Image (tube, coloured by chain):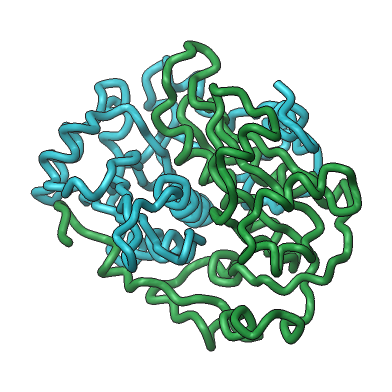
Chain colours: A cyan, B green
Amino acid sequence: MNIHEFRKPEYDVDPIFLNRWSPRAMSGEEISQTEILSLFEAARWAPSANNNQSWRFIYARRNTPYWQTFFDLLAELNQIWAKNAAILIVVISKTTFDHSEKYARTHTYDTGAAWENLALQGSSKGWVVHGMQGFDYDRAKEVLKIPDLYQVEAMIAVGRPGKKEDLPAKYLEREFPSSRKTLSEIVMEGLFRG
Amino acid sequence: MNIHEFRKPEYDVDPIFLNRWSPRAMSGEEISQTEILSLFEAARWAPSANNNQSWRFIYARRNTPYWQTFFDLLAELNQIWAKNAAILIVVISKTTFDHSEKYARTHTYDTGAAWENLALQGSSKGWVVHGMQGFDYDRAKEVLKIPDLYQVEAMIAVGRPGKKEDLPAKYLEREFPSSRKTLSEIVMEGLFRG
C-alpha cells in the first residue's frame, strides 16, 4: 500500500506518523510475550508531568482464561472484528502524583502520549493496533478490580494483520487509512480562532 | 550523547522513543514557519475516537507581538529556561464530537496522542520539545479567548538546542534523559495489581 494515495501531508513529516493507521482486519494468530512487552516498552518512555508516568496497562492474551472477560467488555460493534486480536488491553491512569498524592492534572493527557508510543511501535512492526472507546468503562473498572485512584481511559486491540475481505461489508469499506482536518483547522497563531 | 548510558530498555523498541527526552537548554534562535508547521503536521496524524481530532494548537513565535502574552502565562520556574524557546504552544482540546455534539470521552487522551507525535517529530529533528503544566490554565483560557467548548490541556516550549552550561544550577543537574518505572510496575496481565 502506498500511504500517499490516502494521506496528503502539507509539510514534511517522519513517515512513522503517516504510516500508522487503525485497521480492523486481524488474523487471529497469537503474539509472543516478548513482542507484547515491546509495545509497553515503547509506551514506557513517553513524557509526563514531573515524570509521574500515570499510565498503566492491563492486558489479556487470546487463549488464556483472561480473554473472555476483556472481550465481554467490548461493544458488539467492536467484538465483530476484535475477536481476531492477539491481545486486548485496558488502558488506565493514576489520577494523582506519586510524590505528593495531589491531583495530577495531566494524567489522561500523559497517558494518551504513552498510548501513541504503543500505537506507533506496533504499527511500525506491521501489526494492527486499534484504539477503542466502545466498551463498558464502569464494568471494566469493576471486573478488573481497578481502585478508585485510577481512571479507565480506553481499550486497545492488537493483532497480526488479516485479510480485509473477511471483514463484514460495513467495515470492509472503511478499511483504509483515514484522512484528517487541514492544518488551518487545528493550528492558530496568537489567539483562538474557531 | 549515548542514550543507553541513561536509559535501559527491557525490550527491543524503536530508537525514536528512547531518544526523545525533555531538555531545557535552548539557544534563543528562531524556527522557521515551515519547520513549525511540520510539528503540527505530525500531531495531525494521531488517532482519535471516531477520527474526531479533538486537538487544537495555539502558538506564539518569539519576536512577535503574541510572544509576551504566552510567556506571561508560564510559572516563574518555567520562564527561567523557556525564555530561550523559539515558540510557545498552548494545547487545547474540543470536548465534543463534531458530528453529534455529544461529549467526547477521550478528548484529552486523544490530544495527548497528538502531543506525543509533535514531541517525537521535534526531537527527531534535534530540537528541544518540552511539555509543561506549570502555567496559569484559567488565564490562558481567558487571554487567548478560548471558548467553553474547549479545554486547556498543556503548554509546550520548542527551540533549538542550547548550551546546558547556561542553565541555572538547579536545572543543569537535571539536564539529562530521565529514567522510568520498570515494566512490571505499569503492566499487568488479566487484573489490576497495585
Residue A21 seen by the camera: no
Q: Position of residue A11 (x, y in %)?
A: 81, 43
Residue at image coords 44%, 25% = B104
Give above or below for B59 relative to B19.
above
Q: Quadrant of residue A41?
A: bottom left
Give above or below for B15 relative to A194.
below
Give above or below for B4 relative to B47.
below
Q: Quadrant of residue B85?
A: bottom right
Nearest the eye: B61 or A22: B61
Q: Position of residue A166 (x, y in %)?
A: 37, 27
Nearest the eye: B152 or B12: B152
Q: Position of residue B22 (x, y in %)?
A: 60, 68
Residue at image coords 28%, 43% = A151
Drawn side of residue A128 relative to residue A70, left or right: right
Q: Position of residue A137 (x, y in %)?
A: 24, 33
- Report the label total: 0
Residue A170 seen by the camera: yes
Q: The C terminus of chain A is located in which quarter?
A: top right
Residue at image coords 50%, 33% = B48
Nearest the eye: B95 or A19: B95
Q: The N terminus of chain A is located in which quarter?
A: top right
Residue at image coords 80%, 37% = A189
